[in-house]
Amino acid sequence: MVNLMERGVLLVLVACILPAILVECRVRHYKFNVVMKNHTRQCSTKSIVTVNGKFPGPTIVAREDDTVLVKVVNHVKYNLTIHWHGIRQIRTGWSDGPAYIAQCPIQPGQTYTYNFTVTGQRGTLFYHAHILWLRATVHGAIVILPKLGVPYPFPKPDKENIIVLGEWWKSDVEAVINEALKSGLAPNVSDAHTINGYTRPVKNCNSKEMFNIHVKPGKRYMLRIINAALNEELFFKIADHKLTVVEVDATYVKPFKTDTIVISPGQTTNVILEANNKAMGKYLVVVSPFMDAPVPVDNATGFATLRYPAFRHKTLSATLTAPPPINATAVADNFTNALRSLNTKEFPAKVPQKVDHSLFFTVGLGVNPCKTCVNGSRIVADINNITFVMPDISILQAHYYNISGVFTDDFPAKPPTPFNFTGNNQVTNVGTTKGTKVYRLPYNATVQLVLQDTAIIAPENHPFHLHGFNFFVVGKGVGNFNPKNDPKKFNLVDPVERNTIGVPSGGWAAIRFRADNPGVWFFHCHLEIHTTWGLKMAFLVDDGKGPSESLLPPPNDFPKC
Ligand code: C2O
């Protein structure tokens, strides 16, 4: 008996302590001090909300299966939360981050430690503030390395680079959105696109305004590209270099070559770049908006350079490239249509083949009356006519502690009145209703969700993001979804798996997922202005059987409202 116990203790020692010493620590600790910091961009200085003073914030590196603890200390005047965008948070919804959905905010002066384990994911994701418009400057990369000893399913890069794309406003971002909410109109577009925090050269300006990617000839680079912009889908292109796409949203894809990638806010894309250009020198890297609807965007191209060493200190002009036209739908389609799950034995595409809940969501804008607004009306947004209103405490808490009166679980599975969703001259607002409604799913239910853009005010590409899950993009098309014919063309074999999907402008996209993660999961357009206007809802997934299928209890330091 004693002997067995001793052996048990020894086994625990071997299993837990030895590998930690010999291999590496499986628990990663980070500290985020959220502080104001002056940054100079576009030749003028502005105080912004940052993680540890950095813009973009520090990178989080973990391996698949690691546990990550991030202690967030709020030193600014705003309420704060951080979301680990794309991390599945299996049973740990308390660490997901969206304010009033998963948690009450971390108030000024308060601290909260996010605690989650990375399960079944490897690749690039990112984190960002998930309250107000703070994510404009509070964001950074998450790098998930494969398990120790497991190679990438593509030739190993010599070096990896992180490329975070963003937007820069010369004025205070919170002032921009507050102004818009007051007037009922659209907010000012940004003043510049950023590449790793830098914009583009400014004449007669001493501050560093441009980012350089340094490469050595003959070497292979993996660029981990993140779109952390608030409101703009972006094209990314490097002069005279092809990019091989190998992963999106932390799932491997069948590799393919392209010269332009398209990336929506909330999406990540890993590409391989071979630094094999015979001409060497400097090459322009361009980031420009993609908008194929009559909606104003920041149309200024962001620039960086790719530099080979011999030219590092010379002022030779760079090889130029033109970004695609702003409305280049065909370029965007070429890219997204090429995306396929890797679907190998090691990385199978587990597409749900049968559907328990078939949902149809119209997504788009609307106009509601507003006495105090400039035009007597305000722009709103809705899903199935519901303009989602945030509650005062988090829905996850209300669900866990059975607090009534916070939300209802009657989110409609389809629009109340069908209409010609994408028809021309779609001027009628079908009238949106305010509500804090969730769609309830039993544990492990399979869901098919068709997202249908509407032409009310204007058709527009909406990058929809689902918290807590990845989904498979089984189909997409232009015009109105045809429930008879379109499903026949669905790809149920190797569709791309991701967490954010651009619903085509004036079209539809169909996704499938399995509700195997208990909790409350936000689902929203990742254009921040649309989220603000109400283009959001949440799924509530009930506990399954036993502890392994149930939400864990909240941590002790869970913020209070
Ligand atoms: Cu990256 Cu709810 O968002």
Image (cartoon, rainbow, N blue to C red):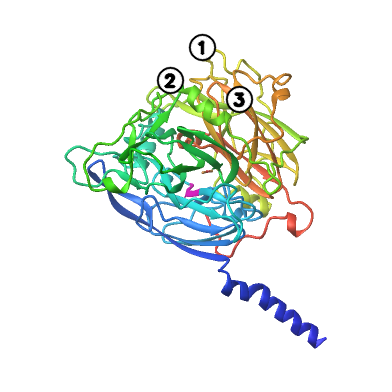
Q: Residue at x 69, y 27 (%)?
A: 490
Q: Position of residue 320 (x, y in %)?
A: 31, 32
Q: CA distance from mark 1 to mark 3?
A: 19 Å
The label on residue 425 is: 1
Q: Position of residue 286 (x, y in %)?
A: 36, 35
Give, as a three-letter code, the residue at label 2: Pro
Question: How many marks on residues?
Answer: 3
Asked if residue 517 lies left or right of residue 555, the reply is right
**Is residue 128 shown in magenta?**
yes
Residue range corresponding to the magenta coloring: 126-130
Q: Residue at x 39, y 50 (%)?
A: 56
Q: CA distance from mark 2 to mark 1?
A: 13 Å
Find numbered disc 2 in the image and state the secondary structure of the residue it sits on. Answer: loop
**Is residue 223 shown in magenta?**
no
> Residue 92 lies in what quarter of the image?
bottom right
Q: Residue at x 56, y 68 (%)?
A: 25
